[in-house]
């Protein structure tokens, strides 16, 4: 009887740590990771397929709910803004989410919430410090407006 108890305890000791759920993609809400900065760059950068389900400005950050296929490799995301602002009032900046899937060919549909600090996309030229972000692939009823 003692033998079974010892084996059971050993099995649990080794099995429980492996039962932690793996994170798919990058969850930028986790407190152990700092929020990545959006960057100004080339919007022609290649990107794997990603569906942006929703986008919302929250202070100096943007929250994106995305879905993509994968499950066999780590995925990463970058938020890239055009260096060019329109001359409209308020000015507008084109923005693109860059998805790197690291060759992941798996077909599991993954939904993730991403957060980016969008301070680098702010309009530092305008007196009122506002800019509308036109996120590629997203149509919103309310403009994604940054105000600093």
Image (tube, rainbow, N blue to C red):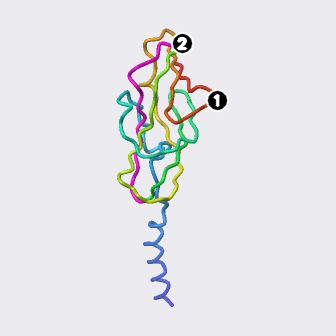
Residue 131's label in the rendered image is: none
Q: Position of residue 125 (x, y in %)?
A: 43, 12
- Residue situated in front as seen by the camera: 92 or 114: 92
Residue at the spot 44% in from the left edge and 18% down from the top edge: 85
Q: Looking at the picture, does residue 76 appear above or below residue 118? A: below
Mark 1 and mark 2: span between their CA atoms? 18 Å
- Residue 127 appears at what percent x and percent y? 49, 8
Q: Residue furthest top?
A: 127
Label at residue 141 = 1
Q: Label 1: state its secondary structure.
A: loop
Residue at image coords 52%, 11%: 128
Q: Which sits in the foreground, 63 or 96?
A: 96
Q: Is residue 78 above or below residue 94?
A: below
**In the rendered structure, which segment of residues is drawn in magenta?**
72-88
Name the residue carrying label 2: 89
Residue at 43% x, 72% y is 14
Mark 2: few/some/many CA within 10 Å (<14, 14-19, 20+): few
Q: Position of residue 46 (x, y in %)?
A: 36, 40
Q: Earlier in the sequence, mark 1 or mark 2?
A: 2
Res 124 → quadrant = top left
Measured as percent of width and height from the top left, residue 109 is found at 52, 55
Provide the secondary structure element on which disc 2 rests: loop
Furthest toward the bottom, the residue is: 1
């Amino acid at each position: 009887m003692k033998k079974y108890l010892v084996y059971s305890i050993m099995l649990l000791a080794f099995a429980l740590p492996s039962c932690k759920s793996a994170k798919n993609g990058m969850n930028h809400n986790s407190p152990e990771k700092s929020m990545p900065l959006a960057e100004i760059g080339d919007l022609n950068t290649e990107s794997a397929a990603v569906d942006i389900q929703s986008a919302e400005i929250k202070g100096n950050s943007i929250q994106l709910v995305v879905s993509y296929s994968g499950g066999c490799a780590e995925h990463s995301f970058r938020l890239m803004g055009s260096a060019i602002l329109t001359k409209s009032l308020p000015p507008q900046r084109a923005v693109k989410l860059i998805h790197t899937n690291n060759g992941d060919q798996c077909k599991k549909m993954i939904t993730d919430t991403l957060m980016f600090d969008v301070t680098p996309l702010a309009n530092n030229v305008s007196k009122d410090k506002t800019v509308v972000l036109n996120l590629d692939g997203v149509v919103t009823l309310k403009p994604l407006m940054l105000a600093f």
